[in-house]
Image (tube, rainbow, N blue to C red):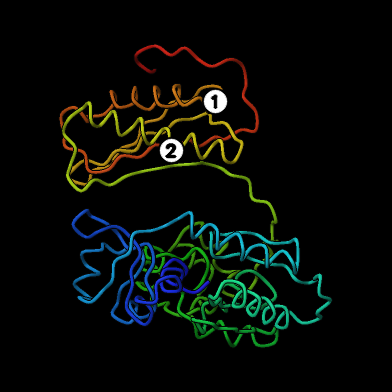
Amino acid sequence: MDAFYASVEQRDDPALRGRPVAVGGRPESRGVVAAASYEARAHGVRSAMPMARAMRLCPGLAVVPPDFPRYKAVSTAVFTIFRTATPLVEPMSLDEAYLDVTENAWGEPLGVEVARRLKREIRTTTGLTASAGVAANKLLAKIASAWKKPDGLTVIAPDRADAFLERLGVEALWGVGPVTAGKLHARGWRTVGDLRAAPEEDLSAAIGSAAEWIRPLAFGLDDRPVVAERPWKSVSCENTFAKDLTDPKAIASEVEELSRRCVRRLGGIGLFARTVVLKLRYSDFETVTRSHTAPPTRAVGEIAQRAVALLRRTAADRRPVRLLGVGVPGLSNTEEGSQLSLPVGLP
């Protein structure tokens, strides 16, 4: 989907259409940009950017608080459309998925025709635009999907894949983030073509074991299948505060509320949590985590009690706190044994 959250807001509020829009928190509350419209992107506004910086880049920016239930409803409609073509749909987020349309319900022999039909159905049903990439594997399809946004459709035929890849920057490859890209640039390797020409031993010396999977990608090789059902691995909730918290009781209360939010999400997906993780960021941006593992549960009192007890293993009673988060990884389909009666402190 194209600028998904921002596009939903522009669709539903005519006053925002054609204007630079950022969905996220208020700048005075240390908010960050969750999504930016294309009008805002023209001014350099990007997701994950502090909203205060976005406002400096684009003084006329309209800041809209996120409405996730509304975005989820639109996402559900879009994924319903995907599944009219094929059951092999692998969600990557609310607004992005891989589809294997080798065999499809419409009997279309060409992936590009499936993509055109999906784009048309999405536009008719939701009033929003989507961009599609059609290729022989996930790597190439993902790159192609971003090639002509918004409302784009790019096909990378197998006989064109080499020429297409060679001229791209190394950042186009899956898994090459800023740190890895910096290491590659330091060696003078800026394009995928440069990586192809690099001796294997030099590439390994530059980025270690990552070379084992980055080198095949540079040659367009990606055998990852489309996995229709991806199991939940964790649930987490966090909050960055407009003003640092210094009252231990207020901090504990926030941790309890974050725990309740996690448990509500666990109930929604029908899973239980083994591990409780507390994340805490102090006012100087130092971030620490503490965890405790026990038999699976989704009892709100138990998870909140464990999370609050983890606070005692931090300096939250002595240092201002900027951010708090509670996460529950180690998810399970069943609850093993009875609920724990925990002691005051945790091991």
The residue closer to the viewer here, 303 or 176, is 303
The residue closer to the viewer here, 18 or 258, is 18
Q: Does 95 sit left or right of 99 as displayed?
A: left
Q: Can you give x and y, in whole percent of width and height, for residue 243 in the image?
A: 17, 45
Neighbours of disc 2 within 10 Å: few (<14), some (14-19), many (20+): some
Q: Can you give x and y, in whole percent of width and height, for residue 116 in the image?
A: 67, 82
Frontmost of labels 1 and 2 is 2
Q: Does 203 sit left or right of 52 as displayed?
A: right
Q: Does 33 sit left or right of 155 as displayed?
A: left
Label placed on residue 261: 2
Spatial CA span between label 1 and label 2: 15 Å
Q: Can you give x and y, in whole percent of width and height, for residue 43 in the image?
A: 28, 80
Label placed on residue 61: none
Label placed on residue 297: 1
Q: Is residue 127 above or below residue 258?
A: below
Label 1: which secondary element: strand
